[in-house]
Amino acid sequence: MQSLSSKTNVGLKKAAIFLITVGSEIASKVLACLEDSEVEELTMEIANYKDIPIDQKESVLKEFYENFVAIDSFDTGGLNYAQEVLEKAYGKEKSQKMSERLLRNLSNGPFRFLKDVEPEILVNLIKNEHPQTIAMVHTYLPPDLAAKVLCSLSPELQADVGVRIAKTERTSPEFIKMVEKLLEDKIKNISKQKTSTISGVETIVNILNQVDRSSEKAILTSLEEKDKDLADEVRLLLFVFEDILKLDDKAVQRLLKEVDTQILVKALKGTSKEVKDKIFNNMSERASLIIKEDMEAIGPLRLVDVEVAQQAVVKIIKDLEDSGEIIINRGNEAVVI
């Protein structure tokens, strides 16, 4: 079974079924070891279940037992011993798959810290390394992440790395640790840069959200003279997409005249029911029905695509405010539309 902290739907469902099957006493002890966010996800999933077929329970328990045997063998005798035990118990083909899953799931397994890194960031981290190093890292990544990273490399590098992955057999522990340390250091540097940038931008945004409009304009004008890109970033953060709830109906209706329908469809895919209701209540019944149908038809979207669409809507709101056509209620000024 996948880690209880797995963010995939399959892993979450299996974890929920396992906890239901073992009973509330054991389940409560397991939940006590998890993060609050994980407990919330699991309890929500558990609450959605009513009747679970007995064969599904047996399948989940069997998978849990297999992983338990694998991890216990690894802890007592190392990877080679664990693989030997698994092969004797389950045969060569099945034990090989279990070993691969074990390596990916072990908290102390190689490159475990990369599983939550965005593919785009990971590509930038490794693209300038030797193809053999890139191939080695791929062998320890979850398959879905490895596929995204490989597809993001240049065509020439893709081919080279693909061949090396296929030919990869054993890698020395020393080399693995060296590459792990290299990537960990790179990630730490990126995190430090992001933290220092975000904290400053968030601070100025929080300040500007509390001042009147004339003071905000004066500060932004001064900031723009020194750093236009930073000023633009601050402007976008001053009003986030969910803040549409702060607009009155006339302002929303004015906004809808300027927003492209397809951009609105994408922007609404990743927002709350309250914001959707705010938008739909300011449309004709026919227009809202068309938007809802388009949202259904477009299917799942990448988070980045939703965010780009939402930023486009926010920019229109800011432009309308700058032109004096709407005024955003900041909580400390009267609203005049």
Image: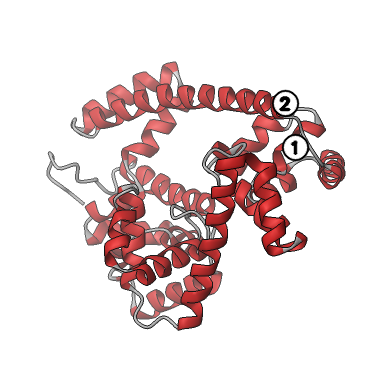
Residue designated by label 2: 175
Residue 331 vs 267, above or below: the answer is above
Where residue 101 appears, x then y in whole percent?
63, 53
Identify the amino acid type marked 1. Answer: Met
Which residue is drawn at the image coordinates 50% and 69% (left, top)? 60
Determine if residue 253 is in view: no
Q: Nearer the viewer, residue 224 or 195?
A: 195
In this picture, residue 55 sits left or right of residue 275: right
Whichever of callouts 1 and 2 sits on the residue coming sooner in the sequence is: 1
Determine if residue 63 is in view: yes
Crowdedness near tag 1: few (<14), some (14–19) or many (≥20) residues, C-alpha within 10 Å: many
Counting every numbered tag in the picture gives: 2
Rounded to the nearest angstrom, the CA distance separating label 1 from label 2 is 10 Å
In this picture, residue 249 sits left or right of residue 222: left
Q: Nearer the viewer, residue 70 or 220?
A: 70
Where residue 276 appears, x then y in whole percent?
33, 65
Which residue is drawn at the image coordinates 42% and 24% (left, top)? 197
Where residue 109 appears, x then y in whole percent?
59, 39
Name the front one of labels 1 and 2: 2
Residue designated by label 1: 136
- At mark 1, the secondary structure is helix
Mark 1 near mark 2, Cβ–Cβ under 8 Å? yes
Residue 107 vs 290, above or below: the answer is above
Which color mode does the image show? secondary structure
Which residue is drawn at the image coordinates 12% and 39% (left, top)? 332
| Mark number, residue 204 | none
Where residue 48 appears, x then y in whole percent?
34, 74
Identify the amino acid type marked 2. Answer: Phe
- At mark 2, the secondary structure is helix
Crowdedness near tag 2: few (<14), some (14–19) or many (≥20) residues, C-alpha within 10 Å: few
